[in-house]
Image: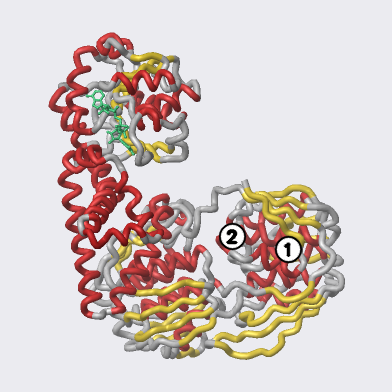
């Protein structure tokens, strides 16, 4: 790797972009000197008077031969001419970059001019700009938090790429790298095509005299859509030719799309129309994070959020709970595979369940909503899914990936499932192995981790033997695959696990047989659309139940909460500890048992928690530890019940935080021994785990002093209403951002 200097910079073309870069470099003292050169002398003089540059480069030869870095910021059509002009004066160590909106044409030009290609040549393109031109509009903040794409060539020295990247980072840009061809493809679709459409729409309407009114009364949509038609015409003229081939491809794709829309309107085909609109709306919402490969809902993961909780004196009233997470996933999946239209109420608009919803949209299912928990799914039947246009992104949702894998293993088209960084490190072997036994063809990355590449097979079999499973999600994936098999699928559960999938299947008209602990899925099932109301999430209720149980004088009512027998371990444990929890109005709703839960303050006493109850309270263990910390006497639990703390990390986070708050807690062999006491205030971290953050918020309410909990951003994605609902019942919880 060569070393390159960037002390003396020459910007050729001192307009909006060149001027903004020069200005940003100077404002941040990133270089010793910035010279400006422009064929328009007036721009240079204005640039000098505005402090954009240190000096005007009157003598181009001297300026080029003395520059460490040359930035070409001229229109794309003159890049070749400028490159050939400066070529004789370049030194072997001169860095050359540009800011042009197209890259292929520049690289072709450079290949015609140079042999060999200079090692310091690294093309670039800032994804930033305005409709204005000229140095007068330059802005030193233009590139802050904007992307800058570098397209290094095989001949570019890595040291050159690094030096140029550092300068762009210095002016606030996020630097990305791409191949030249890919850059031009992506930009043709995301920037060049939209500009042409805006120009074309305004031009089409403006041509007709009677349309004057359209402009006079133009609504916001028209203004927003056509804003970019005010951009510099000659720049866009140049870009059209510089990126001709990619742009023609994109115009053809768009024309096809508009033709489909026209046809759907002409035929009165409202399902197709709704399909286009709902897919587009959700794609629009999720576009940026799919590209970023980060969170599925708004990207809050990296946003610092601290919870501040004041010691509380009372809890009263009623809290609304979010819809159950596990049931929300299954509701959308089975509704999509059913025949007919299913309306779902109480759908959890959390990151994971939204990932499942979007995946089915990618598979061609029309889904309206979610809007305040309401979702309408136009089921396509078991055999109506369409091949997605690309790999399906599932964010951090392991549930979506496992369940979907069962469905997709049986489809007649290939699919690929991938997730964010965290999900990409989770082994899917326990899922993939039994599906392979059913005949599925699934490839994984090393260690059984995603991406999962699923190849179509002739047909799946029921494996011809009993499939043994120890996890609800693997069981669910096998049941879903079992919807497509020729022969019976028999699943034996090594231990009882959540049965939401079985219940949801029966709600959609597919009965499973259960015999001697074995589940039998008979081939030839059909799913029929239905109406669903997702019960409130007992896992979310757990935090409020613990808080109310331990707050003197408290009385809390939680309505329509799911009390599935595979999930109620926490209630049994707390009752055993002395909690006053009443289940009122117990009923069945959509094949799930639900109840209204009334909790009154009580004195909790430490107990030895039976392992079988604990395994029915897996997600609730963080809340349970807070109850143990505040109970009288000693509570012991098994730290290693499978799944109890999802990972050791969650257990460690909870233990560390409670110890910091003054609780005597220790691990002996595999028993966690918690001696109840008084929680103190202070500052702890949730480590970014939403359940830990929510449990610690309850600890703060019960503590003797104020408590700050760091890294709580994920709560908004996981349980969007948590803070509001906590406040509603009297927990003095405040969110500090930034
Ligand atoms: P601009 O404001 O018009 O600036 C370009 C400057 O280059 C003008 O002063 C122009 O002078 C000068 N110039 C033209 N030919 C020249 C030559 N042969 N030698 C020296 N100077 C010459 O344009 P811009 O918006 O900054 O665009 C510059 C580059 O940035 C283009 O390649 C464009 O694709 C790219 N870009 C633009 C945006 C955006 O939003 N504007 C965003 C990203 C990238 P005249 O006025 O006399 O022509």
**x and y percentages locating residue 419 in the rendered image:** 42, 57
Residue bearing the label numbered 1: 625
The image quadrant in which ligand 1 is located: top left
User: Residue 92's image quarter?
Assistant: top left
SS at badge 2:
helix
Q: Residues within 10 Å of mark 1 (few under 14, many from 20)?
A: many
Residue bearing the label numbered 2: 716
Q: Is residue 257 left or right of residue 293?
A: left
Q: Is residue 707 left or right of residue 647?
A: right
Residue 281 vertical position relative to residue 223 in the rendered view, above or below: below
Disc 2 vs disc 1: which is toward the camera?
A: 2
Q: Nearer the viewer, residue 405 or 131?
A: 131
Gap in angstroms between the C-alphas marked 2 and 1: 22 Å
Exactly how many numbered labels are in the figure? Answer: 2
**x and y percentages locating residue 534 in the rendered image:** 54, 80
Q: Is residue 574 left or right of residue 234?
A: right
Residue 45 vertical position relative to residue 483 in the rendered view, above or below: above
């Amino acid at each position: 790797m060569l070393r390159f200097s960037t002390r003396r910079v020459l910007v050729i073309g001192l307009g909006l972009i060149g001027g903004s870069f020069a200005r940003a470099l100077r404002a941040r003292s990133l270089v010793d000197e910035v010279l400006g050169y422009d064929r328009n002398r007036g721009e240079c003089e204005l640039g000098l008077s505005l402090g954009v540059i240190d000096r005007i480069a009157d003598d181009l030869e001297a300026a080029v031969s003395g520059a460490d870095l040359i930035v070409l910021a001229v229109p794309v059509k003159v890049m070749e001419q400028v490159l050939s002009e400066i070529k004789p004066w370049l030194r072997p160590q001169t860095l050359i970059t540009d800011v042009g909106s197209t890259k292929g044409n520049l690289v072709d030009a450079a290949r015609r001019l140079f042999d060999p290609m200079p090692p310091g040549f690294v093309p670039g393109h800032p994804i930033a700009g305005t409709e204005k031109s000229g140095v007068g509009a330059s802005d030193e903040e233009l590139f802050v938090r904007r992307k800058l794409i570098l397209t290094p060539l095989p001949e570019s020295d890595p040291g050159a790429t690094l030096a140029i990247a550092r300068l762009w980072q210095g002016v606030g840009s996020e630097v990305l790298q791409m191949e030249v061809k890919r850059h031009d493809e992506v930009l043709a679709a995301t920037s060049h095509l939209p500009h042409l459409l805006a120009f074309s729409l305004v031009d089409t309407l403006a041509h007709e005299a009677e349309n004057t009114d359209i402009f006079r009364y133009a609504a916001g949509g028209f203004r927003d859509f056509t804003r970019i038609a005010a951009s510099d015409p000659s720049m866009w003229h140049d870009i059209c030719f510089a990126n001709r081939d990619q742009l023609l491809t994109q115009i053809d794709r768009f024309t096809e799309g508009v033709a489909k829309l026209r046809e759907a309107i002409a035929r009165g085909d409202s399902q197709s129309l709704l399909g286009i609109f709902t897919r587009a709306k959700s794609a629009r919402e999720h576009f940026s994070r799919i590209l970023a490969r980060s969170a599925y809902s708004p990207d809050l993961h990296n946003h610092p959020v601290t919870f501040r909780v004041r010691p509380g004196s009372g809890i009263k009233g009623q809290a609304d709970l979010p819809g159950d997470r596990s049931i929300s996933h299954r509701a959308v999946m089975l509704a999509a595979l059913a025949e007919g239209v299913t309306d779902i109420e109480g759908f959890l608009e959390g990151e994971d369940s939204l990932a499942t919803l979007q995946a089915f949209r990618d598979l061609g299912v029309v889904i309206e909503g979610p809007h305040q928990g309401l979702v309408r799914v136009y089921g396509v039947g078991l055999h109506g899914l369409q091949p997605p246009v690309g790999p399906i992104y599932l964010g951090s949702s392991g549930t979506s990936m496992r369940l979907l894998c069962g469905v997709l293993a049986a489809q007649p088209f290939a699919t690929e499932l991938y997730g964010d960084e965290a999900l990409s490190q989770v082994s899917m072997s326990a899922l993939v192995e039994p599906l392979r036994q059913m005949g599925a063809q699934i490839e994984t990355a090393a260690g059984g981790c995603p991406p999962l590449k699923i190849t179509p097979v002739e047909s799946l079999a029921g494996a011809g033997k009993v499939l043994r499973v120890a996890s609800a999600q693997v069981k669910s994936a096998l049941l879903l695959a079992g919807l497509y098999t020729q022969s019976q699928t028999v699943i034996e559960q090594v231990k009882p696990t959540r049965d939401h999938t079985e219940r949801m299947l029966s709600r959609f008209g597919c009965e499973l047989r259960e015999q001697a602990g074995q589940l039998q899925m008979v081939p030839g099932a059909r799913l029929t659309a239905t109406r669903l109301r997702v019960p409130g999430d007992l896992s979310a209720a757990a935090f409020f139940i613990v808080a109310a149980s331990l707050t003197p004088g408290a009385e809390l009512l939680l309505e329509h909460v799911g009390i599935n027998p595979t999930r109620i371990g926490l209630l049994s444990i707390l009752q055993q500890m002395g909690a006053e929890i009443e289940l009122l109005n117990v009923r069945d709703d959509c094949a799930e048992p639900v109840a209204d839960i009334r909790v009154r303050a009580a004195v909790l006493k430490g107990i030895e928690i039976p392992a079988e109850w604990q395994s029915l309270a897996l997600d609730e263990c963080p809340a349970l530890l807070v109850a143990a910390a505040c109970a009288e006497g000693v509570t012991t639990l098994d730290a290693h019940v499978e799944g109890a703390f999802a990972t050791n990390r969650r257990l460690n986070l909870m233990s560390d935080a409670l110890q910091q708050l003054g609780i005597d807690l220790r691990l002996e062999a595999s028993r966690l021994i918690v001696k109840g006491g008084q929680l103190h205030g202070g500052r702890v971290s949730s480590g970014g785990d939403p359940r830990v953050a929510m449990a610690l918020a309850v600890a703060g309410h019960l503590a003797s002093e104020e408590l700050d909990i760091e890294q709580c951003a994920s709560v908004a994605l996981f349980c969007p209403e948590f803070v509001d609902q906590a406040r509603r019942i009297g927990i003095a919880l405040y969110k500090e951002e930034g």
